[in-house]
Amino acid sequence: MPILPIICSCLFFVLTDDSSPDFAHARETRYEFEFGAMGSNFRVVGYAQSSQQFDSAKKRIEERIRQLEDTLSDFRQDSEINRLANQAPHDHPAKISTDLWRICTASSKLHQQTDGAFDPTIGPVSKIWRLARKRNRLPDRQEIVSVMKSVGWSKVVLDPEKELIQLTANGMQLDFGGIAKGFAADEAIGILKQHEIHSALVDAGGDIHAANPPPGREGWTIVIENGLRTNSPDEANVRLSIANVGIATSGDSIQRMVKNGHSHSHVLDPRTGLAVEDSCGVTVIAADATTADAWATALCVLGPERGMDILKNDSSVHALFECRDPDKKQLQKTQTSGIEKFVTGDSVTNPAAGVRD
């Protein structure tokens, strides 16, 4: 039977198959739906006993993601993080929602683990670069230097006992673009499980949480299609089989601006305020999509050498770097040893042309 592709982004193809279900799951049917949120396309696939069971989960998932948008979007003037930014600097700690508290505590931990390469206080710099890309010109360096005074997780004070936050510098703006979609994917999977739908996958614009695999299958098949690759057989796409993990990619293969011969990624280094210039794509597999999303962003900032050095101390995060060297002649791959257990079958050169499992 042909594989039914779920296009997660230009970097991923999720391949599923309804064939060969085992007897225990013979009554489960494959359902899916899509909707737009967080500036991306969300796609949800699940195996349920009935359409009513799946539709109930569908309704709750859409409501939940909209709720997260109201909290985490820096594009919505009335979002919770924008209301916080409008009040910065805070004279006193402010009470925040449970959702914002959870993502702040996760971000604090990830900021420490990534040696500062993941930092949601990058908001003021993000705004400058968004406008620069829209105008197709590099931002003024002095403007970046000026707003960097408002950047740095050390300027965020969290009170774990009362779930309070204090932004201590003028002009601070939280930007959870490097973690929010992964967090949303995890929340959607949680809702599916609450509805007794355990074989499921949620793709939040390329940030994926894969729960139990389809009936009769060992995993969900993912093909990493890196835009940095050429059509050379030596640069074939990598096929992975995953279940009960999160997976995410980051890089400059789509969202970038080329000026004076240099590629400026949409990924920003929160330590300098500058766009990452190395042509690298990073794929991360972790326990959940929240973690994978944040680490993929951070590893783009860190690069393969420093990134691999940090990951030596964390066996729960698996990474694959694919970087184009300066002379454009060869794609360099660097990966943690844990990636190998997810690699399956032969690599493929053109997944869009009809991959078969």
Image (spheres, rainbow, N blue to C red):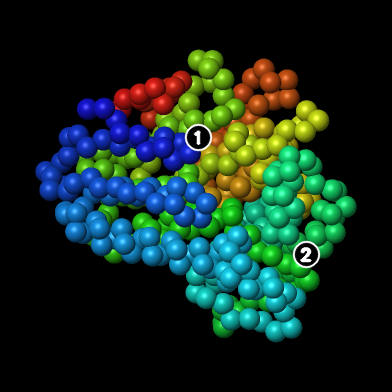
Place of residue 49 in the rendered image (x, y in percent of width and height, measured from the top left): 16, 54
Mark 1, residue position: 10
Q: Residue furthest front?
A: 135
Place of residue 89 in the rendered image (x, y in percent of width and height, measured from the top left): 75, 76
Q: Quick check: can you spot residue 290?
A: no
Tell me the residue at 19%/54% (across/down). Answer: 51
The quarter of the rendered structure image containing the N terminus is top left
Tell me the residue at 72%/49% (across/down). Answer: 131
Residue type at the position of mark 1: Cys
Place of residue 7 in the rendered image (x, y in percent of width and height, measured from the top left): 41, 37
Tell me the residue at 26%/43% (across/down). Answer: 214
- Say left or right for 14 vs 283: left
Place of residue 316 in the rendered image (x, y in percent of width and height, measured from the top left): 50, 49
Tell me the crowding category of disc 1: few under 14, some 14 to 19, or many 20 or more residues within 10 angstroms, Cα based: some
Tell me the residue at 80%/46% (across/down). Answer: 139
Query: Which numbered dot is residue 262?
Result: none
Residue type at the position of mark 2: Ser
- Say left or right for 335 vs 264: left
Q: Quadrant of residue 229?
A: top right
Tell me the crowding category of disc 2: few under 14, some 14 to 19, or many 20 or more residues within 10 angstroms, Cα based: many
- Say left or right for 76 vs 277: left
Q: Quick check: can you spot residue 177?
A: yes
- The answer to whether the residue labelled 1 contacts the one labelled 2, judged by CB atoms less than 8 Å apart, is no
Mark 2, residue position: 150
Separation of disc 1 and disc 2 at Cα? 34 Å
Q: Is residue 212 above or below residue 223?
A: below
Callout 2 secondary element: helix
Callout 1 secondary element: loop
Lower sequence index among marks 1 and 2: 1
Report the number of discs.
2
The quarter of the rendered structure image containing the C terminus is top left
Q: Is residue 338 above or below residue 119?
A: above
